[in-house]
Image (cartoon, grey):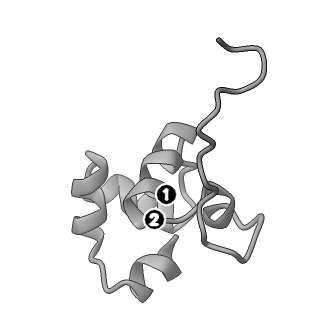
Amino acid sequence: MFEIRKARNLKQTDVARALGISVRTWQRYESNEREPTMSLLVDLAKYLGVSVDYLVGLTDDPTPPRRSSSSPEGES
């Protein structure tokens, strides 16, 4: 998370404010003192325009998946 923030020239205060958390909480995430919740990762991915998979290191492709216009199977 640190690398992508730096690459986009964002300050810790910018990210913390966008996510509605304290700067100290964000610092704990960056230093791996604390694990972000899934909902925070989703909000961060939306803010940065990347996929959650990219944030957690499951892919090198930052492109978020495209949303399908059809509803998921089993939903009406």
Front residue of this view, candidates 8 and 76: 76
Dot 1: element: helix
Which residue is at a point 43% across and 48% down the rendered structure image? 43
Q: Residues within 10 Å of mark 1 (few under 14, many from 20)?
A: some
In the image, is residue 22 above or below residue 30? above
Dot 2: element: loop
Please tell me in which quadrant of the rendered image residue 75 appears.
top right
Q: Amino acid at mark 2?
A: Gly
Q: CA separation, marks 2 and 1?
A: 6 Å
In the image, is residue 70 above or below residue 10? above
Q: Are marks 2 and 1 in contact (CB under 8 Å)?
A: yes
Please tell me in which quadrant of the rendered image residue 18 appears.
bottom left
Q: Which percent across, then down, holds residue 7?
A: 43, 88
Q: Amino acid at mark 1?
A: Ala
Q: Which percent across, then down, holds residue 64?
A: 59, 61
Which residue is at a point 31% across and 57% down the rendered structure image? 24
* Left or right placement of residue 41 versus residue 13 in this view: right
Name the residue carrying label 1: 45
- Please state which of the two labelled residues, at mark 2 or mark 1, is closer to the viewer: 2
Name the residue carrying label 2: 49
* Left or right placement of residue 67 versus residue 74 in this view: left
Front residue of this view, candidates 15 and 73: 73
Q: Which mark is residue 13?
A: none
Which residue is at a point 51% across and 46% down the rendered structure image? 42
In the image, is residue 42 above or below residue 45? above
In the image, is residue 59 above or below residue 64? below
Q: Which percent across, then down, holds residue 68?
A: 63, 42
* Left or right placement of residue 66 versus residue 11 in this view: right
